[in-house]
Image: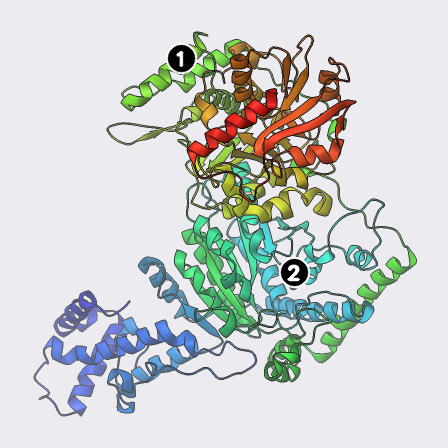
Amino acid sequence: MELTLESQGYLESLYRAYLEDPLSLPEDWRRYFSALTLEDLEDGRRERQAAPLPGEALDLGFLLKVEALRQAYRELGHLAARIDPLGRERPRPKALSLEAHGLSPEDLKRPLPPLFGAPTLGALLERLEATYLGPVGFEVAHVEPEERAWLLSRIEAPWPKPAPEVRRRVLRSLLQASLFEAFLQRKYLGAKTFSVEGLESLIPLLQEAVQEAARFGVREVVLGMAHRGRLNVLAHVVEKPFEAIFREFEELFPEGYVGDVKYHLGHSTDVETPWGPVHVSLNFNPSHLEFVNPVALGRVRAKQDRFGDRERKRGLAVLVHGDAAFIGEGIVQETLNLSQLPGYRVGGTLHVVANNQLGFTTLPSEYTSSRYPTDVAKMVGAPIFHVNAEALDELLFVLALALEYRSRYGKDVVIDLVGYRRRGHNETDEPTFTQPGMYALIAKKPEPWRVYAERLEAEGLVSEEELKAWQEAYLERLESEFARVKAEATPVVYSTLGGVWQGYVGGPDHLVPEADTAFPKEGLKNLLVRLSSVPEGFQVHPKLKRFLEARREMAEEKRPVDWATAEALAFATLAVEGHRVRLTGQDALRGTFTQRHAALYDYRTGERYIPLQHLAEGQAEVEIHNSPLSEAGVLGFEYGYSLDYPEGLVLWEAQFGDFVNVAQVYIDQFLASAEVKWNRLSGLVLLLPHGLEGQGPEHSSARLERFLQLAAKDNLQVAYPTTPAQFFHLLRRQVKRKIRKPLVVMTPKSLLRHPEVVSALEELAEGRFQKVIPERVKGARKVLLTSGKVYYDLLQKRKELQAEDVAILRLELLYPFPEAELQEALGAYPKKVPVVFVQEEPVNQGAWWYLSARFCGEIYGHPFSVVARPESPSPAVGSSKVHKLEQEELLEEAFR
């Protein structure tokens, strides 16, 4: 309890009760008030018979000074805590002195009420010094008041000592972590391992985190981390066989292997705990450090959803950060911001900062403007515990506290594990070039396991003989595995898809048959009725009544289906067939262009109703969430979600396609290359509004050319559909086929309300997605090949010019390239008939470079050329008037 005006009144009432009947109070309070009375008598301040008034007896002024001192330790103690294992001095704040609060050494013997948890000021000061100026620095002043009070009650109570078997287990883990690094450096001299040396305690910390999390009901743990210490984590936390790691060092790979460096790879295992097995998965990660964070969170959310875990208790994300990266990379802020949002909550993340006190060659004074690299976590009120990496017993206390806090409050918590980096950035780097003083201190440091072993030996928990036996047994195991690899030069065998991925495939697209994506017409009609219905008494916005009426008319086939309705029907049909649907993005519920209205809001009460969630008994979940104003963090999260929900339709929508490049890391490092690097598949769908409509350079282009440049070995699907029915079948096809590849869709803007961009309900009830939409024109002098929005401009222009001798073919799927379908469509025309690709993007953008590189002036025997805007470093002009002139010129050129 903190001393406040309320607690002062409480003290006075207790004192009055003591004067009336001492036995009415608990023993500790009687002892305190008795000590106060004796103190007064010894000071000769009163006659024995005169009972002092409550305010005078309690000396509230003195108690307020003591409370100020206690608060100073709570808020500032971390600044002087001994958290640096290199022993460098940390200045002690002046506020951590008696004099700063008007107290003196003479006050040390004065009694304190039980609410201070110590009988005298001296005893309190001793306890505050031990708690707040030891090897743990606590930062909780920024935490919500109720949570802070709970944390302080735990922090200021006696800390339980870990059980002897736990301490021995931790020592053994520390020892193995050190021996493993030394073994790799001895056997593979000069190879990069990005060793964990100096922070070996990270390994037992992660191992014990799994054990402790299981106690709180966690059954799935997803780890995200960069390269530092990763090989050690692979070997000792997720139990990747030593043999597999050694084969990767020997570069014994199967034929055709592309892969990634060994310290980027992931692995998973089942860890036995006293509370049941826990599945632990270390997420693969590129060199882009913190970008794995939202991916790991998305995976945890998907696992929780699969469990039906709405309390977000059964899955845990553990993110291991570098100190410089945690404060330096903006994706950290984006990820933290997701932590309490309804569409992204995972019940709190355990953040562990592997703090080397150095970023490559850059000191903290050079990489952060804040006091600690962890200060960014204060934005979400996360408690921050700075721990000396050599203080293993205290680290275990902090870990237990952190996970209990996470379980109790469902929020993020940070452990700043302060150590050092024994070697350079990698094993061939020379750190003394830039940090000679720091590395002079590091050179004197014994291995951390020796420091902890000395502590346990002194307590009789381990003997020197045992330590020697542990070392010999572990090294013998390493040598045995190493010898086997040297003797049997067989390649690494990577695991095939299993678990929830059983039955799904990657690889060549043409090997996987097309799926039936049609849906019975009567079923579509029923769903349209459900999509246009609201609960009784729900007052629809006056302007949306026509929107719902239009959908009812579509159900009656009085009106064709528009784009937004086709999308809603794709979602609805999949949901009633048992496939979860999840769509997020900025303004996704309403839609950037006021087209979707997935959520309806009562015009009087503001209450929300989502028709897609009320389609049929037993339907799958349909989640649509407005995302924060973030592309990278949200796209990373949805990519992670797709990794653990292959049977669902998982979509991310950009507000405008132009903004997708903010998330370019996820496109390049994850979506496009994960299959060849890590053997991981994803069926994530990107909806990217695209098309030149006079809205300027930043509201015109989703950079189609970049996706096509990344396309190789059937890694992606890139589509630019032109009709609602095509979009309907494309989305259903993504789920119904057994192949899983990311799907990038160029979606419309102005076409959402174009009178020609509609489909008959029959087209959804029958047929399938057409990769190429052919057109037969007898005696055609020219064939225009095009994709997307410009098709409707060409159609209108052909009508104006009455150019009936020009055929227009639509290339709806750009990748994997539909060779057979396009060849068949062009086969209707003599070889002398030229084919002209028409795009509205500048000639150095859009699909043309991709097509010209593929066909080099001739397409299946036809002359092949392009009509496009002139090359430009910018996607579009900033003037609507100039845009219209350019577009008209482009259309005229196409029909010449």
**Considering depth in this image, is 379 or 272 the residue closer to the camera?**
379
The label on residue 227 is: 2
Residue under the point 61% across and 38% down = 845
**x, y percent for residue 464:** 71, 80
**Considering depth in this image, is 866 or 230 the residue closer to the camera?**
866
**x, y percent for residue 776:** 67, 11
Residue under the point 72% across and 47% down = 677
Residue 399 appears in the picture as rendered = yes
Q: Label 2 amino acid?
A: His
**Considering depth in this image, is 1 or 461 the residue closer to the camera?**
1
Q: Which quadrant of the structure image shows residue 37? A: bottom left
Q: Is residue 240 left or right of residue 591?
A: right
For label 1, the crowd category at 10 Å Cα-Cα, with few meaning under 14, some 14 to 19 and many 20 or more, is many
Mark 1 and mark 2: Cα distance apart in space: 56 Å
Residue 577 appears in the picture as rendered = no
Q: Which residue is mark 1?
A: 552
Residue under the point 53% across and 33% down = 687
For label 2, the crowd category at 10 Å Cα-Cα, with few meaning under 14, some 14 to 19 and many 20 or more, is many
Which quadrant would the N terminus be assigned to in this image?
bottom left
